[in-house]
Amino acid sequence: MHDTVVTLLLGATVLSCLTICVENKAANIVLHIPITGQNELLFREGDNPCKVVKKYCKRISSPKETCFNQLHSSVLTYISPAWSEYKPKLRIDASFFIDCNTQVLKTPMILMDPGDQNYRANQTDTVQDMLRLLERAMQKDTEALSTFNGKRNELKLSDIEKLELYREAVLLLPNNLFIVDQLGLALLFLNQEPAARTLWTNAVNRGLWENSLQRPVSRYVKGLTSKPWYNTGNYRFISLREAGYTDVRNELLYNLEARPYIFTEETENLHIGGRWTELRLKSSSIPIILKKP
């Protein structure tokens, strides 16, 4: 049982969701939302949340669009943090993270010239290969994660391929900043700006970013105050890192020799000579697993 309070303002009617209950196994109910003055909003195993909310709002006497927007936002905010729990039980596609309009995520029927530099005869296979790498990376396969990051840069995916890739990737990692941002950019570049903006706004409502126009995807610490200098004494993890310096250094040097593929080249043009490589301890929401010397 998870207690929460959701208030829906439907025209002049106030519907209060007093509690959200989950896992009523006897009725195969995955999630139900009691709403004061109305029937419960029920989600059974195998349901598509978008269709359930739309059907529910058709029975409400208040404006359907207002009902849908508020209920969809509440359900989205509740389900996404517990994605691994709900995804196997509900039938969800990527449009759930936008506005439940599956049309915006359909691959455009654009014929590409084989002479175009972005043309690939096996586009579908390329996307599926990338998704398999991402699935392996989710199992803490560091080499697969490195290969995924390398391929997305090397292949120079077309906007259509990016849409196909990230609309599936968001179902694997819906709370990943990079993937959500890339899905939005693919929509934007394929003339689906309203859908992209809605996706990013929903991500803000889900707590991924503070602002839909400012979407950092790396080196982002939510809630960190912006100021030029910090008192290191206020952050316990810094003293822990300093105390473990010798172990960290030895582990780093070992992996630099034994597993150079987990290091990435600096690509932000911050240096003018020599080589600058980075070891990211987490990428695509997946921690890098180092081997000790």
Image (cartoon, rainbow, N blue to C red):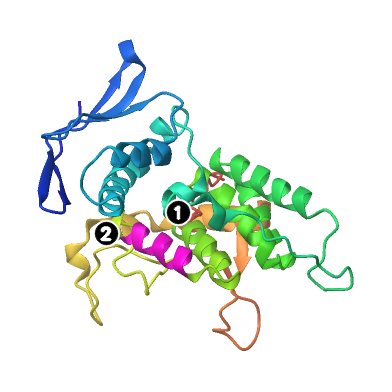
Residue neighbourhood size for the residue with mark 2, other residues' Cα within 10 Å, grouped as few (<14), some (14–19), many (≥20): few
Of marks 1 and 2, the one in the foreground = 1
Camera-nearest residue between 74 and 235: 74
Disc 1/disc 2 C-alpha distance (Å): 29 Å
Quadrant where the image shows the N terminus: top left
The residue carrying mark 1 is 176
Q: Position of residue 3 (x, y in %)?
A: 15, 33
Which residues fall within the magenta stretch? 194-204
Secondary structure predominantly adopted by residues drawn in magenta: helix
Amino acid bearing label 2: Ser
Q: Quadrant of residue 213?
A: bottom left
At 75% across and 50% down in the image, what residue appears?
Answer: 124
Q: Is residue 128 toward the left or the right of residue 208 in the image? A: right
Res. 140 in view: yes
**81 vs 12: above or below:** above
Camera-nearest residue between 28 and 288: 28
At 61% across and 89% down in the image, what residue appears?
Answer: 272
**206 vs 232: above or below:** above
| Mark carried by residue 245 | none
At 31% across and 48% down in the image, what residue appears?
Answer: 68
Res. 175 in view: no
Q: Earlier in the sequence, mark 1 or mark 2?
A: 1
Q: Is residue 175 toward the left or the right of residue 157 in the image? A: left
Local SS, label 2: helix
Membership of 55 in magenta stretch: no
The residue carrying mark 2 is 239
Q: Position of residue 262 (x, y in %)?
A: 62, 56
